[in-house]
Amino acid sequence: MDIRDNRLFLGGIAAEELVVRYGTPLYVYEAETIVRRYQDLIEHIPYRPLRIHYALKANSNPEVLRLLRRLGAGAETVSPGEIRLAKEAGFQEILFTCSYIGRAELHRAIEEGATVHLDSLAQIRHCGEIAPGGRVSLRINQGIGAGHHRHVVTGGAESKFGIPVAQLREALELAGEYRLNVVGLHQHIGSNILDERILLRAAEAQLATARSVEGLEFIDLGGGLGIPYRPEERPLDIRRFGAALAGRFEAFCREYGRPLTLILEPGRYLVGESGTLLATVTDIKRTPERTFVGIDSGMNHLIRPALYGAYHEIVNASRVEGEREVACLVGNICESSDFFARDRPLPLFREGDIVAIRNVGAYGYTMSSQYNTRPRPAEVLVERGQARLIRERETV
């Protein structure tokens, strides 16, 4: 994001120019931000061998996938559809994380050649019946969970994910019955974590567990690396996290007797800050109690505020600096929860102004819908000062 002459520029192109070319609502992704975030991980986690597997669920646009594949990323998938997208984007190393799936879906993932993170004792049995003697990874719930909202905490006693660490011995014995080769341990504790100490504590627990498991080739610490959304939030200290993680992993491998591959599965960290949702102010309603600024988008295009109470920075792309007022930014969906911001100091908008909702590169379009029979937006990638359409706007 850049500001020139009090107007918002994305990847060197004025937001208003993008709107003239592509209309609103419009998702815009800045390729430079994605490249920078990927390089941050590679540069600041000095352990090798290191593999970064991008979590497709964050943003599965094929052009975003191809960009990350060119950078050297692998893919982390959670459905047959994501496996297909990963393969079509050219990914060679594909992980598949299961959660309460049927035998047919598990069979398909195995046939596609993905490395499967098994999530339960039942899945170990199913996998053994489908592909006895195969190579698998076990997702372990260490009892540690964290995240920006309770709906995104994926570890701990209340989480539906993972094999409880107390059942590890039973899981290994069951895998042995089917001659499954457990080559990896996996965990994921939650989403958008900004405190590296929590991530390191979870890593320490996983490494302690790994000491008792023979024949491992990799340890996958999952994703969860966060980005700041609110003004008061500080970014994850990737330098401190990377140095501490690398040092601890190297020490573990010396104890284990050989080097293992360290895998991370970031999604939001790589793409979240790259994205901006542009929309047009269509209506301003001033009541005795509140001011409502309406736009030509809604919770069907960005559900995070309605679903999680998530905060996103809101900018007037037409006049970045100017007067402000306490107002609500709302959408055109017939739902009372269709708010992007409630009673927040916002730019003083006029009809026709372009609204920029920031940090929507992750869990924006991928969680969108056609609710109210409203089509989904177009998507544009800005790269090296050039914008190109990477998904056409839907029509009824």
Image: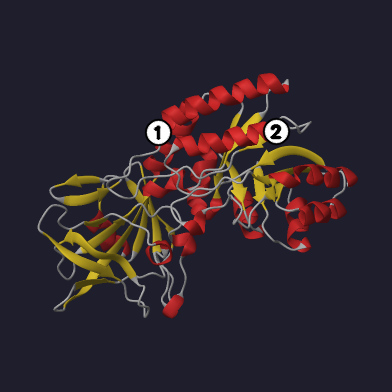
Q: Is residue 190 left or right of residue 176?
A: left
The residue shown at (46%, 57%) is: 363
Q: Which amino acid does the dot numbered 2 rest on? A: Ala
Q: Is mark 1 on a helix, strand or loop?
A: loop
Question: Depth-wise, is mark 1 or mark 2 nearer the camera?
Answer: 2
> Residue 135 sits in which quadrant?
top right
Badge 2: residue crowd in 10 Å (few <14, some 14–19, many ≥20): some
Image x and y of residue 267, in percent: 50, 47
The residue shown at (50%, 45%) is: 224
Q: Is residue 360 left or right of residue 208?
A: left
Observer-nearest residue: 324 or 377? 324
- The disc at residue 237 is 1
Image x and y of residue 368, in percent: 46, 66
Picture mark count: 2
> Residue 31 sits in which quadrant?
top left
Give the residue number, with chain letter if any, for mark 2. 210
Image position of 345 with respect to 381: above or below? below
Image x and y of residue 180, in percent: 84, 43
Image position of 128 with respect to 280: above or below? above
Q: Which amino acid does the dot numbered 1 rest on? A: Asp
Identify the mark nearer the N-term, 1 or 2. Answer: 2
Observer-nearest residue: 315 or 24? 315
- Residue 101 seen in this snapshot: yes
Q: Separation of disc 1 and disc 2 at Cα?
A: 26 Å
The residue shown at (44%, 53%) is: 362
- Residue 24 seen in this snapshot: no
Q: Is mark 2 on a helix, strand or loop?
A: helix
Q: Is residue 147 left or right of residue 26?
A: right
